Image (tube, rainbow, N blue to C red):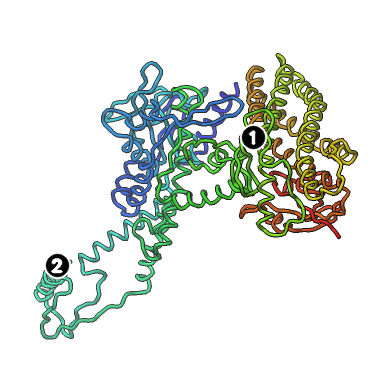
Amino acid sequence: MIRERIAQWLLKAASRGAVFLVGAQHGMPHYNSWSTDKAVREGYKACTWVYACVRKKADQVASVPLVVWKKVGIRKVEWQRVHEHPLELLLQRPNPKMPGTYLTKSRMTYLNLSGNNFWYVVEVGGRPVEIWPLRPDRVAPIPSRTDFISGYEYTIDGATQRFEPEEIVHFTRFDPGDDFLGMGPLQAAAKTVDTLNEARDWNKNAMENRAVPPGGFSTDSNLSDPQFDRLKEEIKEKISGSPNARKPVLMEAGLKWQSFAMTPVEMDFLLSMKFGVVEVCSAFGVDPILIGFNEYSSYNNYQTAKQALWEDTLIPELEDDCARINHDITPRFGDNLWVEPDLSDVPALQEKFEDKVKAGQTLWQMGVPFSKINERLELGMDDVPDADIQWIPAGMVPMNQEDDEGEAGGNPEPEEDEPKSIGPMSLKVFNLQTAEQHAEHWKAFERARTGWYKAVEKRTKKRFKDEKKAILKAVGSSTDGLLDRLSSVVKKQEKPWAKFMTQVNVDVITDFGKRVSEGFKSEFVFRETKEFDVFASGVKSWIAENVGSKIPLLLDTTLEALKQEVDEAIEEGETIDEIAERISDLYDEFQGYRSTLIARTEVISSSNAGSHFAAEQTELKLEKDWLATPGKRTREWHKKANGQRKKLDEPFVVKGEKLIFPGDSTNGASADNLVQCRCTQTYKTVR
């Protein structure tokens, strides 16, 4: 078995090469030469800086709750927060004697001192009901040639108890020299801590002796033994020790005081103590500023240090510990569960949260739905209504709603399948003089469009619904050749889509062509004007070219989406029924945002086409002006195009692209100029 070979290899490697390995033999407890008891006694309890670092990390991590998430959905996988899940409650109250914060602080403390932490898990009916922390110096893993670790031994007061592997959860900080036990940051900083302790003891003794001798008494004559002993006792009594610091001294005749300057070696020793503090803090991943070493402190430095502590130290360590929980404990509560820290209320990360919010705002303005922003940036926000709606960059209003200004919108009325006439049948579109006249014309033109938005959207949804039936029928009962079957069905949708889009173009062009034509007739009552002809060669040619350019893109988008879903499903080992459910959900999405987008794009381009060809059929000598959507949210390049005048048969040039009229795609204009653009055009007679 591969597992046995790996276990044997690790045992062999450990027995001959691990630095801290003692007696790593099959079936024998494996102890670490690093003493946790010594780490506590000479590190945590004896060195201020070790205590401060460990305490800082433990307190910070204990302030963050561990929460449970559950994966839901098949095609569209989502993670939902499960409040008051049994696992979450267990982590909050692991046993009757201690709260969850104690469990967390003990874990962080032992991991920082020894690199190991052990939980004893009590199960009832196969589910954990209690967790008890064990001192790492009392626990030893038992290596196995077949299972890597066959159990654990717990020794206290000479008595030993053996635990099964599943009864113990073993947290570690990685030690490259030991296959079974971890290594804490204190071990790396041990020599530096010893030096600091020695310095502290030296300093204490120095203070008791009035510091490193600041000076000495001298006399020109020799002292007798009784005189020397008496003087020595008086100095000890009246000068030595902190109570006598800075007291005046009365010296006998013949005694002189000679001061000693601090030597360079002594000055270097004090400097090395500062470096020692920095070394210890570096090992623990804590900025010295955070534990009172304020030599380079400022408010900005302090705030940055707090944020860095979380991002560079605590979050990675929390991720390691949660990975162990998710590996050893979480599966016992069911499938598709995940434990992770809830960092949303960590004050040090709020500034980072503000940066995320700014990034999210940028993405939102680009049209990314809030739900995707929330997931991608891990904002931790609760779901909000319409979070999956795609928003339009230029106007920033929902795609299924209308606003009088900006290049977005679409009134949901009317409810009928076909639009009613809104406002006057005719539209005055030429020889407009004032800004107010242009604004009123744009509003009238947009009101005439609103009825078509919902009507065409309904038609588009029905088209996708019919296609969905054909696709699901092709799924069949096997994944063999599935993509080929789906591709074949999608290609067969070319004719239905062409028929559908052609009819939409004809209907909308007819309506707007008649409206604009009536507007011309009302001004030229003495001129014989033909009725608008939607089947004129120019109109038919434009419709054919418009439909012919868009259908391939539409089908390619559909096929790519299907391929992605099928590939993901097969990779995850889903059944054919689950794949069918994925595809069904995909087409439900198509009947939402995609139907809205297609409907609006066609209504906008066809309405402007109707206006253009109606003007063309008057046979008047006309020029056309680009009329940009009024409002602050209009694309900048469309604002610049506002008022651009061209001959009727010449294209506008906007952002380097040619458009016969706003929304025209037949000259290869990109989505930047087409999608959700509600600009239109007006006309001017040429004398």
Q: Earlier in the sequence, mark 1 or mark 2?
A: 2
Q: Looking at the image, is 585 positioned above or below residue 175?
A: above
Q: Quadrant for the N terminus, please.
A: top right
Nearest the eye: 424 or 265: 424
Helix, strand or loop status at disc 2: helix
> Does residue 559 appear anywhere in the picture?
yes
Q: Which residue is mark 1?
A: 593
Place of residue 332 in the rendered image (x, y in percent of width and height, measured from the top left): 44, 22
Q: Relative to residue 109, is residue 328 drawn left or right?
A: right
Nearest the eye: 407 or 165: 407
Asked whether the residues under the numbered discs 1 and 2 touch, taking CB atoms below 8 Å apart as contact, a structural biologist would say no
Q: Quadrant of residue 87?
A: top left
- Residue 243: mark in rendering: 2
Q: CA distance from mark 1 to mark 2?
A: 82 Å
Helix, strand or loop status at disc 1: helix
Nearest the eye: 334 or 19: 334
Residue at x 56%, y 42% (from the top left corner): 373
**Residue at the right extreme of this rendering:** 537
Residue at x 47%, y 24% (from the top left corner): 331
In this figure, what is the number of numbered marks? 2
Nearest the eye: 522 or 455: 522
Q: Looking at the image, is 445 positioned above or below residue 272?
A: above
* Amino acid tagged 1: Tyr
Q: Residues within 10 Å of mark 2 (few under 14, many from 20)?
A: few
Q: Looking at the image, is 483 positioned above or below residue 625?
A: above
